Image (cartoon, grey):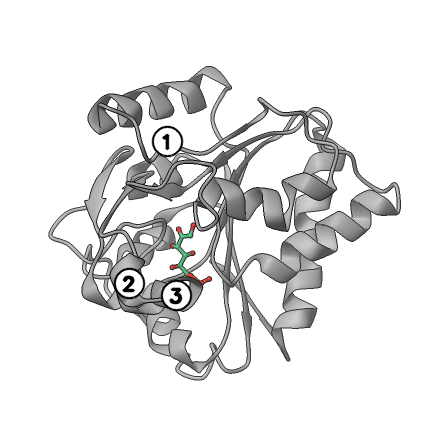
């Protein structure tokens, strides 16, 4: 793992955007894997800036998001589809139909998972996967468990994740309890991985991911055996390294 420690998340996010921009410049039709949540927001803002400056175009980019809440349709303000529009897609030239987020309201969520995985494969797999990190070591919504999920699947969110994500809702009761998430196995298939983690709340998970035993109790620890992972963190998140 290539661990890069920056003084703050602003500097780290600029570096992250530069890495993603370099990927798009090298391969304009890159398949990106994208994350929601707080960690990538500044990175997306920097990408919008690079787009506005004419440095990069998303015209040929394809993207797949890691996850979506079950029960929220894409029009819902807190859906991850809406998040991506609000934070990136509305401000760049990616055409509709070139960005994919699992449907949270499919009548058959299991089938939705199979089809999502097949669609990623049909586009040739993910070139660059952007990840955040849960305080419990989750990536995507792959929560601590006894195994690593190989593919996109339906997950029950842990109490800790529901609590953490309640900051985006008016009350904790509104946070969905299930989601569709790419598996840790799907994430491992990406050719390159860029993980962002900021703040002291991530310090323990970062240490477990980088130096801990590989265990599904810390899903991100599997990234230790991926050949091309860059971890961008601030000083607070690096505190336990
Ligand atoms: C989001 C996702 C999650 C988050 C993680 C960290 O699509 O899959 O794994 O990346 O929960 O969230 P933040 O960045 O809000 O701390």
Q: How far apart are labels 1 and 2 at the CA level? A: 20 Å
Mark 2 = which residue?
A: 161
CB atoms at circles 1 and 2 under 8 Å apart?
A: no
Q: What secondary structure is marked by label 1? A: loop
Tell me: is circle 2 under 8 Å from ligand 1.
yes
CB atoms at circles 3 and 1 under 8 Å apart?
A: no
Q: How far apart are labels 3 and 1 at the CA level? A: 22 Å
Of badges 3 and 1, nearer the viewer stands 3
Mark 1 = which residue?
A: 103
Q: Residue at the location (36% across, 63% down)? A: 165
Q: Residue furthest left?
A: 146
- Sequence order check, earlier mark of 1 and 2: 1
Residue 95 horizontal/vertical position (percent): 67, 25
Q: In the shown orientation, is residue 154 left or right of residue 171? A: left
Q: Viewer-proximal residue, 29 or 103?
A: 103
Residue 159 horizontal/vertical position (percent): 20, 65
Residue 69 horizontal/vertical position (percent): 33, 44
Q: Residue furthest top?
A: 122
Q: Viewer-proximal residue, 127 or 84?
A: 84
């Amino acid at each position: 793992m290539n661990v890069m420690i920056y003084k703050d998340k602003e500097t780290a996010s600029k570096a992250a955007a530069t890495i993603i921009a370099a990927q798009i410049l090298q391969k304009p039709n890159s398949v990106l894997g994208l994350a929601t949540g707080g960690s990538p927001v500044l990175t997306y803002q920097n990408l919008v800036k690079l787009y506005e400056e004419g440095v990069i175009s998303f015209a040929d980019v394809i993207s797949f998001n890691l996850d979506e809440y079950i029960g929220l349709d894409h029009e819902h303000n807190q859906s991850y589809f809406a998040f991506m529009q609000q934070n990136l897609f509305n401000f760049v030239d990616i055409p509709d139909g070139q960005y994919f987020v699992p449907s949270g309201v499919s009548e058959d969520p299991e089938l939705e998972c199979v089809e999502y995985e097949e669609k990623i494969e049909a586009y040739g797999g993910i070139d660059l996967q952007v990840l955040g990190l849960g305080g419990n070591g989750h990536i995507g919504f792959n929560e601590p468990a006894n195994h690593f999920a190989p593919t996109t699947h339906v997950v029950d969110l842990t109490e800790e994740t529901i609590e953490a994500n309640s900051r985006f809702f008016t009350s904790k009761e509104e946070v969905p309890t299930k989601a569709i998430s790419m598996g840790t196995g799907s994430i491992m298939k990406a050719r390159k991985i860029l993980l962002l983690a900021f703040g002291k709340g991530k310090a323990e998970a970062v240490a477990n991911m980088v130096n801990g035993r590989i265990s599904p109790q810390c899903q991100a620890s599997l990234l230790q055996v991926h050949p091309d992972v860059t971890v961008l963190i601030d000083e607070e998140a690096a505190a336990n390294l």
